[in-house]
Image (cartoon, rainbow, N blue to C red):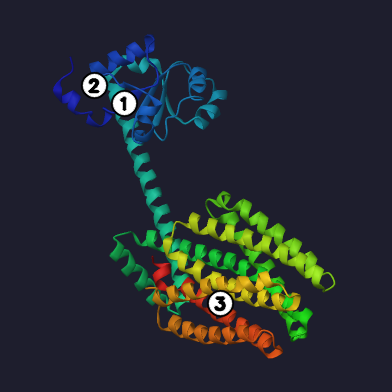
Amino acid sequence: MPSSAAAAALPDCLRLTTLTEDGPTKARLDAALRALGLPEPALWRTAEHRDGAVGHVVLVCAEAQHLLDMLTSESVGVATLVLIGPTPSPGMVPALLAAGVNDWWPVSLLDDPPSLRVTLALARARAEAGQQLQQALQRATRELDERKWVDRAKGVLMSARGLDEQQAFTLLRGAAMHANLRLGEVSRSVTETAGWAEALNRSGQLRALSQRLLKLAVQRWVGIEPKQARLDQTGAQARLVDNLRHLTEWSAQASGAAAWGVELARVRDAGQALEVTLKERLGGPMLLRADAEAEVLLDSAEALTAALEQASGRRALNVINQCGRQRMRVQRIAKQALLAHQLGDAARRDGLPALLDEFEAVLRELDETPLSNADIQLNLSNARDAWLRLLRGLHGMHTESGRLTIIQAGDALLADFERLTAAFEHSLQVLLA
């Protein structure tokens, strides 16, 4: 039996495991380890040892080809893998290295306990060095990744809030301390939230553009500032295309894009169909057909926006969705009022009160939101003034001046809610939520 001193000399070799369960070479290995005062190594079980493989010395008593066959179904992670068996041919060395074999020991080594003890100690030292190198690499990768997210988050805050670099960093560090999170975690969240917020804003714009394109076409048809309406219609169509391009490119990089891919494709198809129809000659039948296609675009954009909000997992983004939907409502109100008058359509006229009620209800909610600030309150005040003008125009929609007021107030409200939606998108409460 070995002395206690001999056994104590190898405390770092006790985490041995083997891939072989029986056989004469395995029996000789067990006997040699007992001679050194070491217990029999545990048998390698993939499910049991994969997560704890770092630092293990895994011994395989087998022929080289048998080991390669075993490694097609077993995983040894980043353990130190040692082959004990007949001398492998030189031609097998590349395959063994590729399979993760770190060393080869002749079977005769098992009959020389002192040499085996030193060899085991060296193998264990290499395993520990590999473990330390792996941990250092993971730390370096984590630190590099953290710096990347911090730099991106600083850029987001500098652009959104007009901060300098030091102010942005101080804000991020304070948020991390307050939330008891790593700076990199907070920075990544801020960066990703900014991406989600912009996507939600752009998706919401598609709803408004579906109604604006029709409102502008009707405006041209009835002859109210037709030249300006044509220019605005061209700009609205370009904006629809740009938003679709951005959402498509962003979705290619965002995680979970499959959750809204179908909705995005439907929006794209509906937008293309509407664009084709709007190029036809102006007239009542064409506008009614285009209006039906605009409704398909609106429904598709609504479904896309809802899917994005749900996939984001960020409840703070709901205010962007609600505020952005107001842009659609003001354009829809103007469109319905113009068509109701021009076509004598009582159903469209009768549907206006419900739209007005929806708009006013959300306006009250935005007034009371805790995310508000001085800039948002100023824009809300301007929006309320424009809303009153729109209501006056609706009361006089049977007159040319009333219809002009509807158009002008609707455009003013659209601009107000564009600014308001952007303000919520860039608010610190949303970005840091």
Q: Is residue 281 left or right of residue 426?
A: right
Would you call the spot at circle 3 few (<14 residues within 10 Å), some (14-19), or many (20 or more)? some
Residue at screen point 54% across, 83% down: 387
Q: Secondary structure at mark 2?
A: loop
* Marking on residue 16: 1
CB within 8 Å, label 1 to label 3: no
> Residue shown at 58%/53% (left/top)?
260
Task: Tell me which corner region of the image, top left, top right, bottom left or bottom right, holds residue 79.
Answer: top left
The answer for how far apart the CA atoms under marks 1 and 2 are is 10 Å
Q: Nearer the viewer, residue 425 or 183?
A: 425
The Cα–Cα distance between marks 1 and 3, rounded to whole angstroms, is: 66 Å
Amino acid residing under circle 3: Glu
Residue position for label 3: 418
Query: Do tag 1 and tag 2 residues touch (Cβ < 8 Å)?
Result: yes
Q: Residue at x 67, y 75 (%)?
A: 335
Q: Earlier in the sequence, mark 1 or mark 2?
A: 1
Give the percent coordinates (x, y) of residue 32: 28, 16
**Count of residue discs:** 3
Q: Earlier in the sequence, mark 2 or mark 3?
A: 2
Crowd around label 1: few <14 · some 14–19 · many ≥20 (10 Å): many
- Asked if residue 239 can be seen in this view, the reply is no
Q: For this rendering, which residue is in front, 125 or 298? A: 298
> Residue 38 bears which disc, if any?
2
